[in-house]
Amino acid sequence: MNVYETKTMQDRLSGNTYPGRGIVLGVTEDGTKAVAAYFIMGRSVNSRNRVFVEEPDGIRTEAHDPSKMADPHLIIYHPVREAGCGLIVTNGDQTDTIWDALSHGESWESALRTRQFEDDGPNWTPRISGIQAADGSYRLSILKSADAEGSACARFFYEYPAVPGLGHFLHTYVCDGHPVIPTFQGEPERVSIPSDIDAFTTELWESLNEDNKISLFVRYTDLQTRRYEQRILNKHQ
């Protein structure tokens, strides 16, 4: 068993119809740019009725057709926000919890200890979060139910150095499932990060299941100048 095996995002996503929502953080193979990506998928009409919209400090989710929005709970939030020279990426409104904590000099771990998995039993969808520092290093976290009843929360935190060409991928579900969708298990997955933003964006978007993919965000930030390029793809475009 090779514990350091690194796969492409295509390898990680191919054949998986429903990894749910996913975060990728890492550094380009030439070592010059920090990379952050976030995607959402959905099975219900309400969940699929969304787009990513650019904000001055990141992105937010928005109803593509407001007349079809049945319940904004858990699906309308601010997934990406800048925090100083860093970047917060999450799959829910814990983005704001982390941002508020950092702005008051508190840690992201303390912020996430005030939160738990989503209240959507029996799935108890995990809250996944990432934060990327100015030097390209990054942290990831997953908050998930400790049992099938959702009676307690297990919290996991991971910290990674900036290694050229290496990233880590964390997603909410192992795969699709009925009636319960299985929660992600194990450590964030090692993935390769190419230097070209368009190549990486295309690889991600085309590897996501066509029926279930909704939106994708990718940002490449120059580690020296802090200038960035980003791409936003919406199925409803």
Image (tube, rainbow, N blue to C red):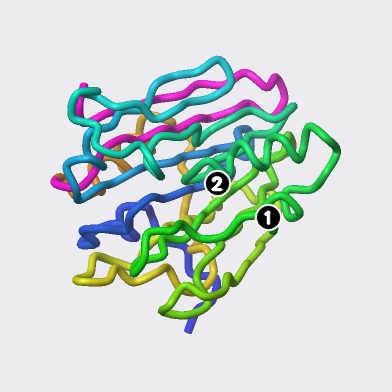
Residues drawn in magenta: 211-237
Q: Which mark is residue 130?
A: none
Q: Is residue 154 left or right of residue 107?
A: left
What secondary structure is marked by label 1? loop
Q: Nearer the viewer, mark 1 or mark 2?
A: 1
Identify the residue position indicated by label 1 in the image.
114
User: Could you give the CA–CA distance between mark 1 and mark 2, rounded to whole angstroms?
Assistant: 23 Å
Give percent across and percent down for residue 215. Answer: 31, 35
Q: Residue at x 62, y 18 (%)?
A: 227
Q: Which mark is residue 25?
A: 2
Give percent across and percent down for residue 209. Answer: 19, 50
Q: Residue at x 55, y 52 (%)?
A: 166
Q: Amino acid at mark 2?
A: Leu
What secondary structure is marked by label 2? strand
Q: Residue at x 74, y 27 (%)?
A: 84
Which secondary structure type mostly characterizes the magenta part of the structure?
Answer: strand
